[in-house]
Image (spheres, coloured by chain):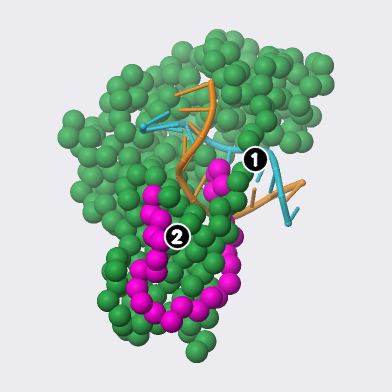
Chain colours: A green, B orange, C cyan
DNA sequence: GACACGTGGCT
DNA sequence: TAGCCAAGTGT
């Protein structure tokens, strides 16, 4: 085993963070593949702090992968609301049903990779953490740690293949799951993007960036394109009985599969060119919401009406089950209308 | 390879 | 405040 891996495992034995899906190192307890898979999907581009509550709710409601496979699509989407990247929830259900159909999770990287919503990272994470296979996880933490250990000056994303090769070269044959979590914990707590704690880093003696003082400049990143701003509107029609006029968004694309209010001008997939219902619309002001690749400045128009809608349906709305953009509009409209 | 795809916390 | 960042995947 490389000195880096042995040193990191010894550090992890003492410093492993506690998480609801994790079994402590050297505890002898095999982690539950369902919980590892669920947590890894939730953790894609998402912080541990944000995931905790969702993970607890999901596992309380659906304790096994078969329970999840039997769930209603709408229940899973509603439970995922607010966590973002909703394609993950759609693929989560597809994957759960595929796993149930084949009688359990596959244990090897290549087969895991064929399942919906499981890419190179998640396949390696599940194979190593849940099944003790020597697969190499490469996430943002690993990229940062490797770029510094080996002083890689190539910017991301071009550097990804090189960093993957370097990460694989350090992965041990024993305790690969603990090793994978150790690198990620190191990246999350010591080898951080800004102000890395090199003074207490167990890998400092191995670190090429530390030797030449480049650690805070790594990994280099190619400049990102500027975000455009899209201008538009949302129509929030409220029935006197308390229902709201909503529509199910298309399965694919922005906020796919989620409940939303009819709108125009900001989202090509659901654009309407006229209000969804005849009403005396009141301008309540604007909300601003930033997505990964654009800003949305939306005027919120609201009305109370009993007219027949041109599209969408009047339904009860639980704001907790709305994606955040729609939640912002709801909060503005419900606050204003209820004051009357 | 480039781009679409959310959200909340931190600086 | 505006931008950066977080355990990526699908097309």
Residue under pointer 1: A226
| A326 horizontally vs A203: left or right | left
How many numbered circles are shown?
A: 2
Among the 4 quarters of the image, the one containing residue A318: bottom left
The earlier-in-sequence mark between 1 and 2 is 1
Residue A127 sits above or below residue A193 on the image = above
Residue A285 sits above or below residue A45 on the image = below
Residue A56 seen in render: no
Q: Chain of mark 1?
A: A
Residue A293, disc = none
| A11 horizontally vs A113: left or right | right
Among the 4 quarters of the image, the one containing residue A296: bottom right
The image position of residue A242, as x and y in percent, is: 35, 81
Farthest residue to the front: give it: A273
Residue drawn at the location 52% of the way across and 24% of the way down: A138
Residue under pointer 2: A264
Residue drawn at the location 20% of the way across and 37% of the way down: A100
Q: Which residues are magenta?
A: A269-294
The image position of residue A269, as x and y in percent, is: 39, 50
| A93 horizontally vs A237: left or right | left
Instruction: Quarter of the image for the N terminus of chain A: give it.
Output: top right
Q: CA distance from mark 1 to mark 2?
A: 23 Å
């Amino acid at each position: 085993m490389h000195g880096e891996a042995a040193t990191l495992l010894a550090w992890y034995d003492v410093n492993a963070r506690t998480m609801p899906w994790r079994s402590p190192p050297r505890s002898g307890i095999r982690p539950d593949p369902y919980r590892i898979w669920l947590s890894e999907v939730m953790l894609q581009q998402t912080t541990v702090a944000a995931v905790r509550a969702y993970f607890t709710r999901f596992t309380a409601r659906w304790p096994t992968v078969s329970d999840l496979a039997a769930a209603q699509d709408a229940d899973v989407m509603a439970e995922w609301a607010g966590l973002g990247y909703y394609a993950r929830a759609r693929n989560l259900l597809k994957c759960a049903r595929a796993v149930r159909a084949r009688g359990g999770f596959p244990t090897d990287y290549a087969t895991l990779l064929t399942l919906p919503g499981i890419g190179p990272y998640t396949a390696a994470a599940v194979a190593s953490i849940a099944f003790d296979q020597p697969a190499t996880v490469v996430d943002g933490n690993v990229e940062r740690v490797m770029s510094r250990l080996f002083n890689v000056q190539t910017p991301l994303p071009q550097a990804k293949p090189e960093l993957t090769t370097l990460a694989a070269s350090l992965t041990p044959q024993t305790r690969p799951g603990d090793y994978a979590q150790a690198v990620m914990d190191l990246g999350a707590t010591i080898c951080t993007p800004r102000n890395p704690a090199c003074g207490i880093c167990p890998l400092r003696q191995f670190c090429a960036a530390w030797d030449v003082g480049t650690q805070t400049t790594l990994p280099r990143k190619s400049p990102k394109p500027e975000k455009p701003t899209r201008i538009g509107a949302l129509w929030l029609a409220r029935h006197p009985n308390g229902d709201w006029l909503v529509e199910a968004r298309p399965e694919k694309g922005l906020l796919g599969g989620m409940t939303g209010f009819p709108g125009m001008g900001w989202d090509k997939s659901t654009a309407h060119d006229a209000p969804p219902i005849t009403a005396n619309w009141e301008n309540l002001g604007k909300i601003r919401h930033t997505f990964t690749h654009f800003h949305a400045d939306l005027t919120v128009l609201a009305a109370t009406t009993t007219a027949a809608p041109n599209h969408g349906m009047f339904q009860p709305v639980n704001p907790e089950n709305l994606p955040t953009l729609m939640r912002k509009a709801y909060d503005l409209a419900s606050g204003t209308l209820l004051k009357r």
